[in-house]
Amino acid sequence: MANELTHSPEFLRLGIDMDGVLADFNAGWIDRYNQGFDKQLRHTDVVQWDGLHELTHFTTMEAFWEWFQQGGRSIFRDLPVYPDSIETIERLARDHRVVIVSSKFDWAIPDTLEWLAEHRVTAREIHFVHDKTAVACDVYLEDAPYHLQSLVEKRPDATVCRMVRPWNVPVPGTVDVESWGQFADLVDSLAEHAPGRRVRPTGDCAR
C-alpha cells in the first residue's frame, strides 16, 4: 500500500519573484563582469531598471544578454542569494503556498531550475511567464516597476509588495517592504486577519 503524504491546507498563495528579490541578479553579473574584463563596477552602480549595458562596454542589451550565456552555464546559474531569503521562504512555506513567478528567457530556464534546486527553495509551484498577472496569488513580492504596475491594475484583490531597491520607485497601490523579515511580518499579519482562508488550491493532491 502506498504511503499517503499528509499536508495541511495553506493560508495564502505567495507569488515570489526571483531576480532582484530572491537572487541578487546585479551582484551576480557585476562580479562576473569585473572578473572577466578587469573592471571595477560596484553593485551600487545600478540605479535604474533599463539600460544595464550602459554601465558596461556592450553597445546593446542584445550583446549584454549574449555575454550572459557564454561558457555553457549562464550567469543565472550562479547568482548569490539575498540575506534571509531562503530561510524566510522555508518558514513561510510551513503555512502558505510559495509560488515562484519569474520572467525568464527560454535559455535561462534550465539554469534557473538548477539554482532553485541547489538552494533548496521550498516552492510548490514554479511559473516562468512574461505576464505575471496570469498567475493568481494572494500576495506578490516583486521589484520590477512594470510588473508592479500591472499586478496592481489586474490583480486588485491581491496585496502587491514592492521590494524596495535602488532601481525602483514607489508604485501607488503597492506595499513597500525593505527586507525579507518585513515581508514575513506582513504575511503573518494578513494570515492572522484571514483565518477563514485556509483552503488548499484546486487540483492539489497529496500522494
Image (cartoon, helix red, strand yellow):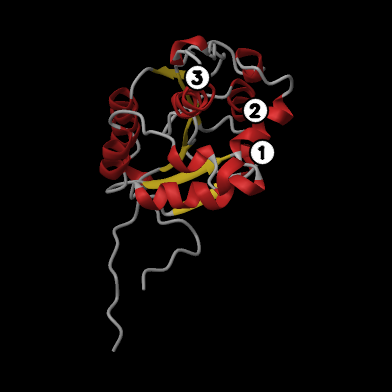
Residue type of the residue flagged with mark 1: Asp
How far apart are the two marked residues, 3 and 1, measured between alpha carbons?
37 Å
Residue type of the residue flagged with mark 2: Ser
On screen, 53 above or below 158? above
Residue 84 or residue 62, whichever sits in front:
62
Q: Which mark is residue 112?
A: none
Q: Which mark is residue 150?
A: 2
Secondary structure under badge 2?
helix
Q: Residue at x 58, y 29 (%)?
A: 156
Q: What residue is disc 1 on?
A: 131
How far apart are the two marked residues, 3 and 2, measured between alpha carbons?
39 Å
- Horizontal side of 207 relative to 99 (left or right) equals left
- Horizontal side of 70 relative to 13 (left or right) equals right
10 Å crowding of disc 2: few (<14), some (14-19), many (20+): some
Instruction: Mark 3 or mark 2: name the one nearer the start of the chain.
Output: 3
Q: What residue is disc 3 on?
A: 38
Residue 90 or residue 69, whichever sits in front:
69
10 Å crowding of disc 1: few (<14), some (14-19), many (20+): few
- Horizontal side of 94 relative to 173 (left or right) equals left
Q: Residue at x 36, y 33 (%)?
A: 81
| In this rendering, the label closer to the viewer, 1 or 2 | 1
Q: Residue at x 29, y 76 (%)?
A: 4
How far apart are the two marked residues, 1 and 2, measured between alpha carbons?
8 Å
| In this rendering, the label closer to the viewer, 3 or 2 | 3
Residue 147 is situated, as x and y percent measured from the top left of the image, at 61, 28
Q: Residue at x 50, y 32 (%)?
A: 19
Q: Are marks 1 and 2 in contact (CB under 8 Å)?
A: yes
Name which quarter of the figure residue 83 lies in.
Answer: top left
